[in-house]
Image (spheres, rainbow, N blue to C red):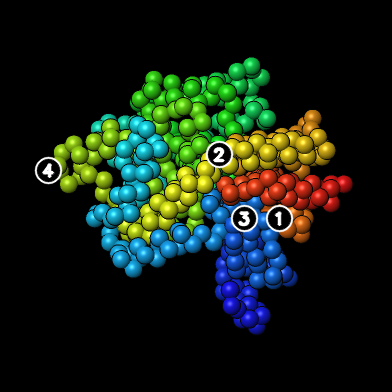
Amino acid sequence: MNITTNELRHVIEADRAHIWHHLMQHKALETTDPRVIIEGKGMRVWDAAGNQFIDAVSGGVWTVNVGYGRETIANAVRDQLVKMNYFAAAAGSIPGSLFAERLLDKMPGLSRVYYANSGSEANEKVFKMVRQISARHHKGKKSKILFRERDYHGTTIGVLAACGQAERAAMYGPYPDGFVQVPHCLEYRKQWDVENYGERAADAIEEVILREGPDTVGLLCLEPITAGGGVIVPPKGYWERVQEICRKYDILLHIDEVVCGVGRTGVWFGYQNYGIEPDFVTMAKGVASGYAAISCTVTTERVFEMFKDDPSDPMSYFRDISTFGGCTSGPAAALENMRIIEEEDLLGNTLAMGERLNGNLHALMEKHKVIGDVRGKGLFQGAELVADRVTKEPVAEKLAQQVVAEASKRGVIIGVTNRSNPGFNNTLCLSPALIATSDDIDSITDAIDGALTAVFG
Ligand code: PMP
């Protein structure tokens, strides 16, 4: 980028003076410069101070799946914008149709795509659909929405009502009624002393359904692998039982693939690791790898048909619109993103590199007592830091932050989940782009090795 040192200084000062950053205690920026990322290529990014980093978190939040600087995506978006940039999504578009067709090819059993802009919105569309189904088809029954402890579904008040991370939702109530939490399924922090932990954790969902009354519950919303809540991979037997329970009580199953979707775990969608058949799937982040804003709410023909029951009644169709859900840049970018994943066999690479990353983290666990647990699938891995392996007491948040800072000094950006949540906090979170090479993976874990030694000795 052609930008002079003085111009860069101006950018940093303008940031300090005017930007309110996401998820940040701004007091920290009174004594240090804000991080301004100015360029990216492949797995690497550069900041305004000229530092180069390997990005082990795909843009910070599991997003840039195909890596930075993809000219073919930029060109696809540019060409589309010049031809036709926008018309409200009551009308269709060329990339909208073509991407929906390609996407549904990978999602047997599902047949309709509803476009919006963000993961939060995609999830809220599901909640609205379920509430409308309740109003029109169940006389107001089956309106409750179950969500799981530690799961996250977005930032608006509607989806925060379904937030399993109490610390994120604590200050923004009151919330709408009809959202009920079910227990988490992290076996490392056992709640039941049983052999079939997966089945037991799923049975806990049934207990909630029976307590609430099955005819009041319309939806069960789950992440395939809990992301920000601590990289929680559901134990064996969990999903089979979840599917059974949903069928038994006629409860729609919604899988939030905002993080796992589009290749992150080495298959197209996280739920496909488990052979389940959801009624709704939502996705955002990696759909277009951050080259354009797009989210999708995908559902079945059975659900879709419920919104056509009485064409003469203006209350029968889905009365929802999202202005920028009609943007053509999103599906244009998503189409090219998907082509790249297929052509470069990034699913195969994700499986191979995921195994390497998981293996390297297990090796670090041998060396560093502070790693209590390693878990993940594909290029979505976590290492939970504990002060004591026996009591599993989490390390202090400050120390986990220091690990992130030390890794950054060693040229690698990593993440840490669950800040400020007693009992769960401080899982290092790794989600490099699906293009990562063996050298990249080893550089990432070498930096973590050095960072852990620097902080814990
Ligand atoms: N669902 C999950 C699982 C997420 O991790 C996130 C964002 N981190 C969201 C939904 C919300 O997506 P967005 O920030 O695009 O609204």
- From the top left corner, tell me how far across and down residue 262 is, in percent: 48, 44
| Of the image marks 4 and 2, the number of the one nearer the N terminus | 4
* Residue identified by numbered label 3: 43
| Of the image marks 3 and 4, the number of the one nearer the N terminus | 3
- From the top left corner, tell me how far across and down residue 302 is, in percent: 28, 32
Residue 412's label in the rendered image is: 1
Disc 4 within 8 angstroms of ligand 1 (CB): no
Disc 3 within 8 angstroms of ligand 1 (CB): no
| Of the image marks 1 and 4, the number of the one nearer the N terminus | 4
Q: Relative to 407, is 249 above or below? A: above
In this orientation, which residue lies closer to the viewer: 18 or 361? 361
Q: Nearer the viewer, mark 3 or mark 4?
A: 3
* Dots 3, 4 in contact, CB < 8 A: no
What secondary structure is marked by label 2? helix
Q: Nearer the viewer, mark 1 or mark 4?
A: 1
Inspect the image, locate mark 3, and give the three-letter code of the amino acid beneath it: Met
Q: Nearer the viewer, mark 3 or mark 1?
A: 3
Q: Residue at x 44, y 48 (%)?
A: 338
Q: Residue at x 32, y 31 (%)?
A: 141
Q: Determine the CA span between mark 4 and mark 2.
A: 50 Å
Q: Determine the CA span between mark 3 and mark 4.
A: 54 Å
* Residue identified by numbered label 4: 312
Q: Nearer the viewer, mark 4 or mark 2?
A: 2
Inspect the image, locate mark 2, and give the three-letter code of the amino acid beneath it: Gly
Q: Determine the CA span between mark 3 and mark 1.
A: 10 Å
